[in-house]
Amino acid sequence: MDFTEAYSDTCSTVGLAAREGNIKVLRKLLKKGRSVDVADNRGWMPIHEAAYHNSIECLQMLIHADSSENYIQTKTFEGFCALHLAASQGHWKIVQILIEAGADPNATTLEETTPLFLAVENGQIDVLRLLLRHGANVNGSHSMCGWNSLHQASFQGNAEIIKLLLKKGANKECQDDFGITPLFVAAQYGKLESLSILISSGANVNCQALDKATPLFIAAQEGHTKCVELLLSSGADPDLYCNEDNWQLPIHAAAQMGHTKILDLLIPLTNRICDTGPDKVSPVYSAVFGGHEECLELLLQNGYSPDAQMCLVFGFSSPMCMAFQKDCEFFGIVNILLKYGAQINELHLAYCLKYEKFSVFRYFLKKGCPVAPWSHISEFISHAVKAQAKYKEWLPHLLLAGFDPLTLLCNSWIDSVNDDTLIFTLEFTNWRRLPSAVEQMLSARASHSSWVLQQRIDPSVSLPISWLRRRDDLTVLLTKKISLCSVSDPSLPFGNSV
């Protein structure tokens, strides 16, 4: 049901008179014995109409007609009493009349909202003062989620109300259901004046919510530079971990969200153990994860490592590996990492195959990615098998760089790739070096493969000479940029020559 809309055919004549403030009509109706407690479709009675619409004389007449506590405190379907409605609208005189008639200044709605909270929410400071004089509780929860009036005032940035609440004894460290204090709220929403008042009152700048987040962390995440400056100058700790796993700091939030000015403030103040600690996470990962090139370069310029430590949190062995999950920012990030000395290895080549970034694969080889020895050969082969359909775009270049094709000839490669890919691999393999186990796997594969593959695996063929000749042919073909694969890619950001 929509409680915001009243239907005229459900509202009593007494209610309509109170809504319109028509004292003459109301007096006549009451003399005729009309009831004052008939509710409309929202549960609103005439006393609610008079309170909400500031019908002072009508309200006084209704209370005179029924001054019982039950009537004064009667609630709408949403749990609003007349005092809630008057406080929300700033009707000071109505509030005074209701309180003098016995209305409870701490009454709550179905959502546990108090008149005090509604006065704060709507900036009604005169009503707020009146409620406080008559016993409204300045502390405690004023809403269902534990958010109270000081939280609300801090959120709205109402300096006058914040000062009044603090003067009346509001608990500056009060927490909602998430462990969030008013100071945290001010930092989160960039309410600089609220933040300044709360800090001046002695509120804890290093308070932590239930998830360990701090005001400095949330301000850095949301990009509130002035709030970050104020917090830092007031003793906020940039090295206070902001999650249960003890790795995330404000510097990570700034880097991930792309707030370079805040990052510039945090870099000289943050302990560098986060860049090298084995159980930590370098903010370089955060910058890469967020795809923010300017933040990444700022960190690297200030000495953070482009290789960082293995990141168990994100599941990547290096920032370069993480970069492959990016799309539009990928090339710029890769270039920046390489610019500051990032090391390339077979895992990066494997990721090139996984994400079909073959131009980058060729570029990495050109930049000197080692083709031996490899520590992650199984992972490379796993991705190579999946990229076999486009082997002409990467395998010839890998072989030309000096990669030993014998390294590929394991069970997963021999059993999984198609005949053409396997034949290409074998054409550049020195059969004199084939282990017997590999020969057996090839023979088993040939037994259920095409006639062409069977001929290629025939051990009577003088393969050492063929292998040397094919390797020379490969070099010539790639040097002349013809035949085997496309060796020019105008989309390559590093230059189109490979």
Image (cartoon, grey):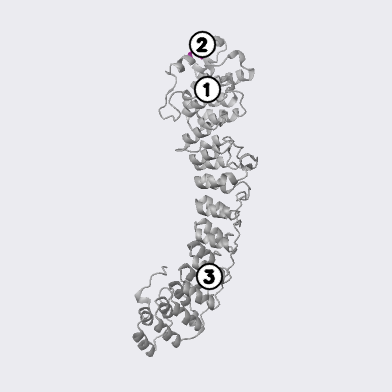
Crowd around label 2: few <14 · some 14–19 · many ≥20 (10 Å): few
Magenta: predominant secondary structure element?
Answer: helix
The residue that mark 1 highlights is: 398
Residue sitting nearer the eye, 62 or 289: 289
Marks 2, 3: nearer the viewer: 3
Q: Secondary structure at mark 1?
A: helix
**Amino acid on which the number 2 mark rests in the picture:** Arg
Q: How far is disc 1 from disc 3 in space, using C-alphas? A: 73 Å
* Marks 2 and 3, the one that precedes in the sequence: 3
Residue sitting nearer the eye, 412 or 156: 156
State whether residue 384 is above or below residue 187.
above
State whether residue 127 is above or below residue 315.
below
Q: Read off the magenta span.
A: 468-473
* Marks 1 and 3, the one that precedes in the sequence: 3
Q: Residue furthest bottom?
A: 31
Do tag 1 and tag 3 residues touch (Cβ < 8 Å)? no
The residue that mark 2 highlights is: 469
Residue 76 visible at all: no
State whether residue 191 is above or below residue 250.
below
Q: Quadrant of residue 405?
A: top right
- The percent position of residue 87, horizontal first and vertical second, equals 46, 74
Residue sitting nearer the eye, 430 or 260: 260
**Amino acid on which the number 1 mark rests in the picture:** Leu
Q: Is residue 265 on the magenta stretch?
A: no
Q: How far is disc 1 from disc 2 in space, using C-alphas? A: 17 Å
- The percent position of residue 325, horizontal first and vertical second, equals 50, 38
Residue sitting nearer the eye, 368 or 445: 368
The residue that mark 3 highlights is: 164
Q: How far is disc 2 from disc 3 in space, using C-alphas? A: 90 Å
